[in-house]
Amino acid sequence: MKDGKIVEIIISEIDLYVIDKVREYRGKNIPYISQVELSQRMGYADGYVGKVENYSSNTRYNIRKLNLLAKALGLNSSREILPNNILQNDLLFLKLKVNTRKNDTVEFDSMGNVIKNYEIIEQKILNEEELKQFNNRRAKKS
């Protein structure tokens, strides 16, 4: 990835997994499902899925939206969007190089695997103290 915007985020490992999985389903669907179309199928504003897939935004899917996503993608269960195993990490600090020109486009390599629209430059698992600080910061905003 030659061009890209550098973004630093704190995100849960499961949120990142779900975002990547939804992108994969959008791309593999025939015909292709754009961010706008998926947003509309879910009953949300046109830009909703785009906001979730924009790593500069804090917008994330929640449990209710997993069910709406499964319906909108024509899946049999919302479990198809979730990992099969428990993920090892809670929150991650990520420094990403994001390909902003192809945010809505999902491309595949020769093996049929999704080419992510980001490259992880730096990754750090938050320790217990950092998790407490992060959770306290969020609680103060409420």
Image (spheres, grey):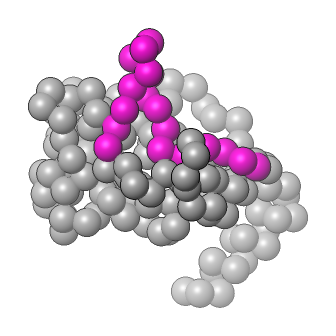
Q: Quadrant of the C terminus?
A: bottom right
Q: Residue at x 44, y 57 (%)?
A: 100
Please say if 139 is above or below 100. below
Q: Residue at x 19, y 56 (%)?
A: 36
**Is residue 33 part of the magenta span, yes or no?**
no
Q: Position of residue 34 (x, y in %)?
A: 21, 47
Q: Position of residue 134 (x, y in %)?
A: 72, 70
Q: Is residue 42 visible?
A: no
17 vs 70, nearest the viewer:
17
Q: Position of residue 18 (x, y in %)?
A: 45, 42
47 vs 87, nearest the viewer:
47
State the image quarter where residue 39 is shown. bottom left
Q: Is residue 136 visible?
A: yes
67 vs 25, nearest the viewer:
25
Q: Quadrant of the N terminus?
A: top right
Report the magenta residues as a range.
105-122
Q: Residue at x 25, y 66 (%)?
A: 47
Q: Position of residue 73 (x, y in %)?
A: 20, 37
Please say if 68 is above or below 132. above
Q: Residue at x 41, y 36 (%)?
A: 21
**Is residue 113 part of the magenta span, yes or no?**
yes
Is 30 placed left or right of 8 in the picture?
left
State the image quarter where residue 106 is shown. top left
